[in-house]
Image (cartoon, grey):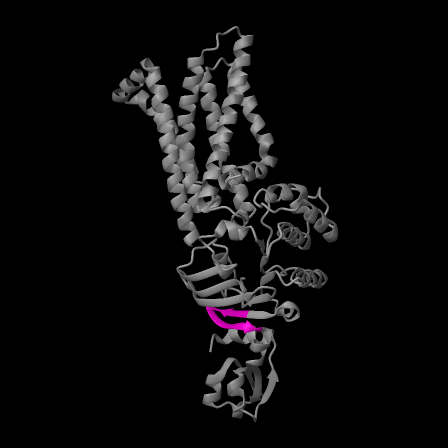
Amino acid sequence: MTGFLRITKLDFFTMKSQFAVYLSLILIVMMFGFMGSSATVLCITGAWFVALMSSNIFAIQEKNNLDRLYGSVSVSLKDIVLGRYVFIFLNYLISFFVVIALYSCFSLFQNKALELSDIILGFSLSFLVFSVITGIQMPLFFKMGYTKAKGWSLVPFIAVMALVVIPSFVSALSGIVEFMQSNQNALIGVGILASCIIQFLSYQIAVAFYRKRKRG
Amino acid sequence: MIDNYLELKDVNKSFPGFKLNNISLSLPKGYIMGLVGPNGAGKTTTIQLILNMLEKDTGEIFVFGKDNVKNENAIKQDVGVVFDSIFYVDSWTVKDTEKAVSIFYEDWKHDVFSEMLKRFDLPQGKKVRELSRGMQMKLMLACAFSHNAKLLILDEPTSGLDPAIRDEFLEILQEYIKDGERSVLFSTHITTDLERVADYITLINRGELVYTGSMEGLIDSYRLIKGRARDLTAELEKSIVGLRKTDMGFEGLIGEKDAVKYKNCVLDAATIDDIVICMSKGGVR
């Protein structure tokens, strides 16, 4: 097993006691589902939830001196960072599939047609929301540790909310929104591409920050 | 064949307000080395540099004859680490800890781990947070032994342990190096532990290397000097480390070579404790 996968596996062990918290996602999605929310809204809710929960692993790491564990075992600094990114992404992916499974059940009971394009759009936009939030959060946690970065980690949530709200007030931007709505395929492509770029850049920055922290 | 399991050559590391300066040491295969010094001397920094948890500024570190940065992953397969406080998740059980830690080792031996748990009386189902300080230390040791580590690096493992557990711990270390194929680097400020088990000593004070070599060599190179106030000349005062003056006289530590000049004073053999105390009071001379 390669180094980063060992860290991902360790992260799952580390979060074992927290899995019950993740069950609340099912309740939230069920509530939104009963309210008739679309697949896209449910997927974004799931992504938002996972991004919110992603700081927990850093909190547990700090509380239990896990940097010492990472320092004593056969893994490189890059493995530690990449392993954590993979862990957080897998959390998102699992939550996406859970949301889609629940959405499919609601569609079945409500005799609604299950549109594949809705699901793909949901994936693209939720992945973008997830990537923007965790893409900013993760380097901060690697740079400062949980306690110091806790306050700053809320900034991306505010930024995403602002990005959603601002086009309603700025007429120049509403044109872009309308264009996106009428070109869903472009929106899906841009969403996935932008998410991948954000994740890649975020990982590189996190490695640089973590290396700097190691220099003391 | 590798003679030294651990070798540091002129290692430097600077932080704002602290500098670890030209640290050199060699730990041969089959021996225990004590890394001593007062709190804040640089012991933990030295250990973190060896493990590449911190990047050194300059110098060279070799573990099993290999560069510790270039061969970090291969080296760590054969290194066991015990810190002063546990570094496993507190909600893990002892069994979970094995599952989590064993991921990282190619040569993990479940049988050895189970045997260690029996020997240390560690219940598999107990959570890390429910274990006493001594039990937590034993769990870290059980993990270190279960991947057949050739080099054990221990950072203040005995601090906060009661004398009975400390005694048991020292016995385990002596047993561990019995086959002559393993070594231990043991950082502590409880120097009485070292007098029992260490073959070599490295003494660091305020980031400076004071001594590295055999334990006997360190004890032989210093004397405790005591005398009346009138015997304390300016020349003698310069030679004494950690000088303490009282109304009755003075006492401190003096180099063995200087000691012969002052036969009018009382000269006693110094213990490691005396040396560390005087060094921390008086700096490096």
Q: Quadrant of the C terminus of chain A?
A: bottom left
- Res. B256 image quadrant: bottom right
Query: What residue appears at the point 58 percent right and 82 percent down from the top-left corner?
Result: B224
Q: Tell me which corner region of the image, top left, top right, bottom left or bottom right, holds residue B99.
A: top right
Is A206 covered by the magenta stretch? Answer: no
Q: Position of residue B21 (x, y in %)?
A: 43, 67
Which residue occupies the foreground of this view, A52 or A101? A101
In the foreground, A53 or B154: B154
Q: Residue furthest top?
A: A111
> Is B203 included in the stretch rendered in magenta?
yes
Residue plotted at (49% across, 37% down)? A55
The percent position of residue A79, horizontal first and vertical second, equals: 47, 42
Q: Which residues are magenta?
A: B202-214
Q: What secondary structure do most residues of the magenta stretch adopt?
A: strand
Give percent across and percent down for residue B205.
Answer: 49, 70
The answer, for residue B207, to whether it is visible in the render is no
Task: Using the rendered image of the protein, determine whether residue A62 is visible from the camera's viewpoint.
Answer: yes
Residue B242: image location, x then y, percent: 52, 78
Of residues B107 and B115, which is closer to you in this image?
B107
